Amino acid sequence: MEVAKVENVSRVYRVGEVETYALRNVSLTIQNGEFTALVGPSGSGKTTLLQLLGCLDQPTSGRVFINGQEVSRLNRDQRADIRKGHIGFIFQFFALIPTLTAYENVEMPLLLNGMSARQRHERVMELLKAVDLLDRKDNRPDQMSGGQQQRVAIARALAPNPSIVLADEPTANLDTTNGEQVMTLMTRLNQETGVTFVFATHDPRVIRYARRVITLRDGTIAENGTGPAN
Amino acid sequence: MRNYLKMAYRNLLRHRRRSALSALALAIALALLVFMAAFFKGEMRSSLEDTLRLSSGHLQVRDIDYDPDKSSVAWGYLIEKPSEVAAKIASLPPVRTATPRLFASGIVSVGQDSAGVQIIGIEPDSEANAPYRQGLVAGEFLTAEDRNGIVIGTPLAESLGLQVGSTLNLLVNTAEGTVDEQTFTVRGIFSTGSSNYDKGIVLLPLAKAQAFSGAGDRASIIFVLLEDREQAQAVASAITGAAYKVLTWQEMNELLVLVNDFSNAYITFLSLIILGVTVTVIVNTMLMAVFERTREIGILAALGMKGRQIITLFLTEAALLALGGVAVGLLAGGALSAYFGRVGIYFGDLGVSGMIFGDRIYPYLMLDDVLRLSVTAFLVTLLACLYPARLASRMEPVEALRAEK
């Protein structure tokens, strides 16, 4: 089943008179349960593609579908609704809310989805257990290591049972050990829960976890094939 | 809402000093406004009280031709057989006391010094003279039979070097348009609390004043005090007589009522200016918060938070700041008003003519002023913080996420 699809998508940034193509006529389908790496050098369009798949941005032309629904023409609030219900994000920087504890950070998307307090509690505890951070649940981000923070971010991304989790260079700010831990965790969660992961990276150590690798170059798909983990 | 409050509260605690200073700015402004409102209210209230008990009373009955500006004792201006008229009015149930008073213009001279005064002929036993009787600082009050005694105010006594037992020369404009002159002995010196008023009057027994000025058995006004001043209009209608006109305290003190209204408008205007300046401090704090937390706003948006939820989050922060400021401001303003409301603020003779002001002003805090100012301060803050809140809500998630941490 298709989780996400882009059709002839271009994204053009205009600075004054200059037009820069971040993506040019890209078409791509992501199936349910995939563990896919978007690779390519800086500026190849990885992040832009993730942002379009994540309804954070809109294409200049072409269409984007999430679970069969076209999302490329939705307004801000409608896109927020899609993100809230269907999409989990993991960012390169450990994008936690600094004033909230690990527990509260994971709880945030559930709050936005209007889940009851009891259900929230069960879900958050389940996720913190899955990322092995139950003992850190009352810690704020500044009381945790980078690896721990990124694991909280993974738990948060999974909290609303998203159709797809999009990770932009999730290990870029981690040392090797923590990076490995994060990728192992993502792999395990992908296998256990069946949730689709698409992650951007240019780190060969991360690419080897992917079952599918899509290589971008200058805003177009240069290669699209199976990954080392397949 | 609980979660907004929790987040807002913690966000404010991130920069405790900055948040505290912003709230303090509002607190100081509100304290100042509350105190100012109390000050004006106290000033106007005591001015009205003083005017009513000293000068206008709740009602005055005058001859139809009487002109208060002339202080003339020409018979045509005066009420005949005033004691009988006063007795009739006093028999009306809402009337506490009614007493004749005669006003004549005169000059007090002692040696080379002299001062223009209004001579007031009073019935010494009347309850209406309580402010003078109770305000005696030396000597004793007049008796109805006294033919040489006079009671004067403290500022006049001081300026002319008079004491109890001193004699003074009093010149009066008589009913015939001539002047008469006589020596009086100071029986008592009073202070009503308003130097400006006290320096311009001297008191004589009514009978003596009538004889001295040639007014005969006549008086300028019947001075009426009621049990409840709100009954003034009703009582005025009950007093009949073609030869009289009856004036209520509102009619006699139009200027005071006008100034009172003006002071309300003045306070409102000033409060908007002061709050406007203060609120820029809070808006600035909120703007700094928005710019510092741009990436966080991006994260919240990525998680699916909508624009209006982001506005709510920032407005909740502003509301907490405003509540803190309002609470501290009210406490400080209330404490200031209460303290000075007890001890008063000494201004001395304000030198305002046409109105009676006490030498000391006692701030008087009204609940409706407190509510009005608090609600205004709170709402103005929230309204002003709509700008940073909307700015936050309109950020593009992609742009916001790209921001430096």
Image: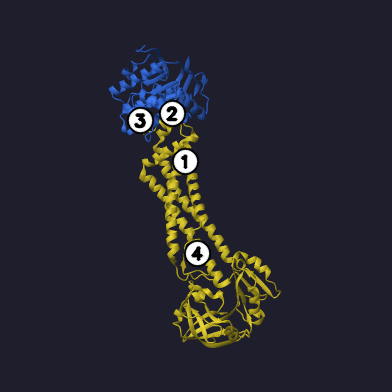
Chain colours: A blue, B yellow
Report crowding for label 1: few under 14, some 14 to 19, many 20 or more residues within 10 A (C-alpha): many
**Picture coordinates of residue A157 (x, y %)?**
41, 25
Q: CA distance from mark 1 to mark 2?
A: 26 Å
Mark 2 = which residue?
A120
**Picture coordinates of residue B64 (x, y %)?**
68, 75
Mark closer to the observer (4, 3): 3
Mark 1 = which residue?
B315
Q: Is residue B11 left or right of residue B169?
A: left
Dots 3 and 1 on the same chain:
no
Nearer to me, B3 or B41: B3
Q: Which chain letter matches label 4?
A: B
Residue at horizontal 51 percent and vertical 30 percent from the top:
A77
Q: Amino acid at mark 2?
A: Arg
Nearer to me, B395 or B25: B25
Mark 3 = which residue?
A137
Q: Earlier in the sequence, mark 1 or mark 4?
A: 4
Q: Is residue B223 left or right of residue A118?
A: right
